[in-house]
Amino acid sequence: MSRHAARRFLAVVLPVLAVAVGVHAALRNVPATSPNQVVEIAPGVYFRHGDLDGHGHCNNGFVVFEKFVLVVDANFPDGAEVCLADIRKVTDKPVRFVFDTHHHGDHAYGNPVWIDNGALPVAHRNVVGEMRRYEPARWRQAAASREDVGKLGLDSAVPPVITFPDRMVIDDGTQRVELLHFGTAHTRGDGFAYLPRHRVLFTGDAVVNGPYNYMGDGNTHSWLRVLDALEELDVDVIAPGHGQLAKKSLIEAQRNYILALHAAVEQGIAEGKPVAELRETITLPDSVSRYVGRMFRDQITKVYSEKKGLEMPLELEELGLVSNPSTARPGKGWKPPKKVVVRGPERWREDFELVAPGVKVVFANDHETLLGEMADADAIIGTASNEIIDRGKNLRWVHSYSAGVNQYIGVGDPSMPGIEKLVDSDIVLTNGKRCYGPEIADQAIGSILAFSRWLKSSIEGKHDLRGGASHGDARRPAWRAVDPGDREEMALRGREMLVVGVGGIGSEVALRAAACGMRVTGIDPAVQSPPPGVTRLRKPAALLEELPRADVVVIACPWTRQTHGLFGKRHFEAMRPGAILVNVARGPIVQRQALIEALRSGKLLGAALDVTDPEPLPDDDPLWKIPNVIITPHNAGQSEGTARRRFLLARENLRRFAAGEAMLNVVDKRRGY
């Protein structure tokens, strides 16, 4: 997140328990502390220095409100008990909330202790997911080695009871604590407790004071963006997750350490050194040496893995790509692949070979070479055909760069028969789903604005020279107001959008529409709960029922046997007069003659078509002559970002295929997506 984005973020009010503001002088001198010491760093605000070396405890904070106490970090169970005892020395007010800055055991395993004492654990919503992802196994290990965890008799960590998306405010007029999330840093759920009245920030382990940076569950590139956001906060005192209290300059020190680590690893990569050599030879400047400790070699490996694609790219994870466990190594019968054929840029070779050690990666971009390499290939990335499948007797995996795979599996239409041998085989098919969503969603919203604000007519140059308006001796050209007839211009705020298909593209459209103040209803057969931005979620059987409500209808579903010709005459008749249709899926989902009639009749305010039937659209097609139509050449998903994500996904799935791990974006060949 950029600094400007952080400013905008902090201006947005999200879930708020209570709102009140005050000003209080900040602590000017930061005292030195030692383990188990409690200091008051602002009126009613306390920092407890955790005994890390003796008991593995994190630092704690606690804030005394008028009628209750908020604790920062649950600690381990025995850490929670000693922290609670120290709170009782200060106040007899009940502890109402305990804020888990992230999911790690030394910050969250004490949740049961606080719950037993009447407190509710609070955290960013990603903490719940990270607990499910990591903590069952880690909890069992801790229970075997730590008496305080073992005696609880639980199977796993207790997750937070209250979660928030990006910001939650607790304010009773005497104290104000803003719980903030700026993205992935030390973990995917890092939260910060910011006290603006006192200019104090509790950082968890995203900012530490000493050699305590565990990096295994986070992302160091995103971490730097989070630190940029923290710099924008008005802060004097940093209460880190480990180590002594510090001034705001500790944020810069944390950043400088990560930057120095990046620079050293990048230099080693440029010199062609393997990671094993980098682990033994890298040193960092004295200015950041206090961050170097027992985890240093693992930190080098982490940064190397991020830069070389040896772990799941955060960008793909944030898009919501999911894996299919059925494609993971099944057991003794699994054999590592020996050869993968790629139709793609030759510049990818080094990256692909690195993530698939022991696999022969062959780049074949001309047809004859490609066919000649298929006999002993385990996989092909970038294309498939009947001939390729016939030649590839050992094929186990086909990867399509495109999100739609109708060309491979067919749609029940003679013009798109698919590859029958692929559909009927055990070959895994993966696709580029979600790689194109952000750009296509941008274009969808842009097209809607072009109609709702009459931009299309204005841009086409409907202007004249009006008499009476002059500047000197020359008349000034003045834009003539475009006459919308008896239709009003459509402000998006408060309008209804219906998104047919809320997968990778539709969910991105919904996010942007919601940001414009629209109410979004989604239609989808597979999605079980409304994605962010979607207010209501319905099944396809409700399509005709929902159409009369919608001011804008966006088609973003896959082209399958079920959706071929989905939108016909009765659907256009059901739509609200003056509605806008946007199709960013596939042309044959909409019956073309029914669309033409709806446009000519004036039933639709307009239609934005990034896809048509056929493609390319012939020069004499009547759609070109209808004025309230925007046609683009199926290019909505194209950008540098899309190209990068296509590469990242292909590389990540190759890494997983070579290692026998669960693969991303596996297509259900029978369902078509």
Image (cartoon, helix red, strand yellow):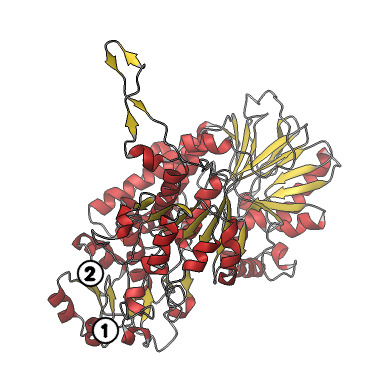
> Residue tagged by mark 2?
343
Q: CA distance from mark 2 to mark 1?
A: 15 Å
Q: Quadrant of the C terminus?
A: bottom left
Q: Is residue 365 above or below residue 228?
A: below
Q: Is residue 159 above or below residue 666?
A: above
Q: Amino acid at mark 2?
A: Arg
Left or right: 110 as drawn, with respect to 259: right
Secondary structure found at label 2: loop
Q: Position of residue 47 (x, y in %)?
A: 68, 39
Q: Position of residue 463 (x, y in %)?
A: 34, 31
Residue 103 visible to the viewer:
no
Nearer-the-camera pick, 494 or 156: 494
Q: Earlier in the sequence, mark 2 or mark 1?
A: 2
Q: Amino acid at mark 1?
A: Ile
Residue drawn at point x = 49 percent, y = 62 percent: 572
Left or right: 73 as drawn, with respect to 471: right
Q: Residues within 10 Å of mark 1 (few under 14, many from 20)?
A: many
> Residue tagged by mark 1?
389
Q: Residues within 10 Å of mark 2 (few under 14, many from 20)?
A: some
Nearer-the-camera pick, 264 or 648: 648
Secondary structure found at label 1: helix
Residue drawn at point x = 47 percent, y = 34 percent: 4
Q: Position of residue 263 (x, y in %)?
A: 33, 45
Residue 9 visible to the viewer:
yes
Task: Tell which residue pokes out farthest to the right in this image.
Answer: 92
Q: Position of residue 492 (x, y in %)?
A: 54, 44
Left or right: 602 as drawn, with respect to 538: left
Query: Badges 2 and 1: C-beta atoms under 8 Å apart?
Result: no
Q: Is residue 346 above or below residue 88?
A: below
Label ID, residue 473: none
Q: Quadrant of residue 660?
A: bottom left
Residue drawn at point x = 35 percent, y = 23 percent: 466
